[in-house]
Image: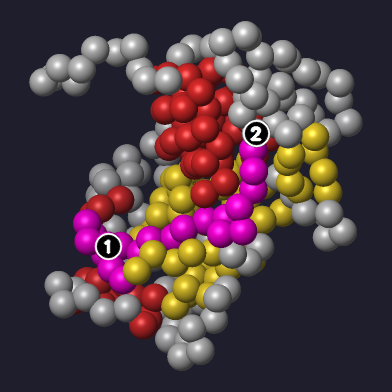
Amino acid sequence: MNLNFNNNNDYYVSDVNVMDIARYGDSLAISPPPAIQATAFEDTTNWCTIGYYEMNIRVGTPFVGNHPTLIVDGFTDPNNSSDRFCLGLLSNVNRDLSIEQTRMYIGKGVRIYRSGASVYAECLSECAIFIQSASFNREYGYKPDHVYKVAKGNKMKIFDNKTFARLLNNSVSEGYEAVYALNEICTIRMSFVKGWGSQYRRQHVTSAPCWIEIRLNGPLQWLDRALIELGSSDAKCSSFS
C-alpha cells in the first residue's frame, strides 16, 4: 500500500491491496492469498453523501459533498453553496410541531471535515449533536450501537481510513458476510438537539426529530470491489434469511 500526502498534507491512498495493509513509515505488509486479487482504493471527488431525515422520512435530495470541509446547518443559503447543506430550505408536509421546534435550534449545525486519514465532526450549534459511528465505537471499545453526545465547540473522529483498511484486511479471510458487515462502518448517523439510543427515551434514530446519515463513498466503493472479488455469499437463502 502506498500512503501519499499532497501539498495540503491531505491523506490519500493508491495501489492498496485488500490484504496488503501498512502504516505510513512502517514495514508491515501482508500478502493476499492466491484466491483474492488486488483490490485498490481509489478516492472519489464526491467523497460523501448526506441524507436529511425527520423521524423516519427522508426530506429533500441527498447532498453530495465534494469539498474537504462541509457545513450542515439550519439556515437558508439562497446561493446553494456547494460546501453547505442548508436544512432550513427543505420542506416536509408531514412536519409536526416537535420537528419544527427542533429545527429552530439546529443553528450553525455541524462541520464535517477530512484531516489526514480521518473524518471529523465538530459541533457548531448551541445545542449538542448526537453521533453513532461504528468506527469510533470499535476504536474506543463502545458497543456497536453506542451514541456519543458532542457539545458545542467539541469534535469527534467519526471515521479512520487506516483502521478501516485493517478491518477489511482481517475480514477478507473470514468470508463474504464479514466483509459485507463493514458497510455499517462507512455510514454515520447524527441527530441534532435530541439524542437517541439506550441512554435516551428515543431508542432508534428514526424517532429523532431531525437527523442526518453520512455515507462515505470512497470506502463504500472499496468495499464493493472487495465483495466482487470474493463473489457471492456461501450462506443459503431461504424465507427465513
> Which mark is on residue 165?
none
- Write down the region rendered in magenta: 41-60
Q: Tell which of 194 and 95 is nearer to you.
A: 95
Residue placed furthest toward the bottom: 78
Question: Of the residues shown, which amino acid type is indicated by label 1?
Answer: Arg
Instruction: Residue at the far left: name it.
Output: 239
Q: Can you tell which mark lies on residue 40?
A: 2
Density class for disc 1 (Cα within 10 Å; few <14, some 14-19, many ≥20) is some
Residue 58, disc: 1
What element does badge 1 sit on?
A: strand
- Residue at mark 2 to residue at mark 1: CA–CA distance: 33 Å
Residue drawn at x 61%, y 29% is: 39
Q: Position of residue 62 (x, y in %)?
A: 39, 64
| Residue at (88, 31) in percent of width and height | 25
In this picture, residue 221 sits left or right of residue 5: left
The mark that comes first in sequence, 2 or 1, is 2
Quadrant for the N terminus, please: top right
Residue found at x 76% / y 48%: 11
Specify the quadrant of the image occupied by residue 99: bottom left
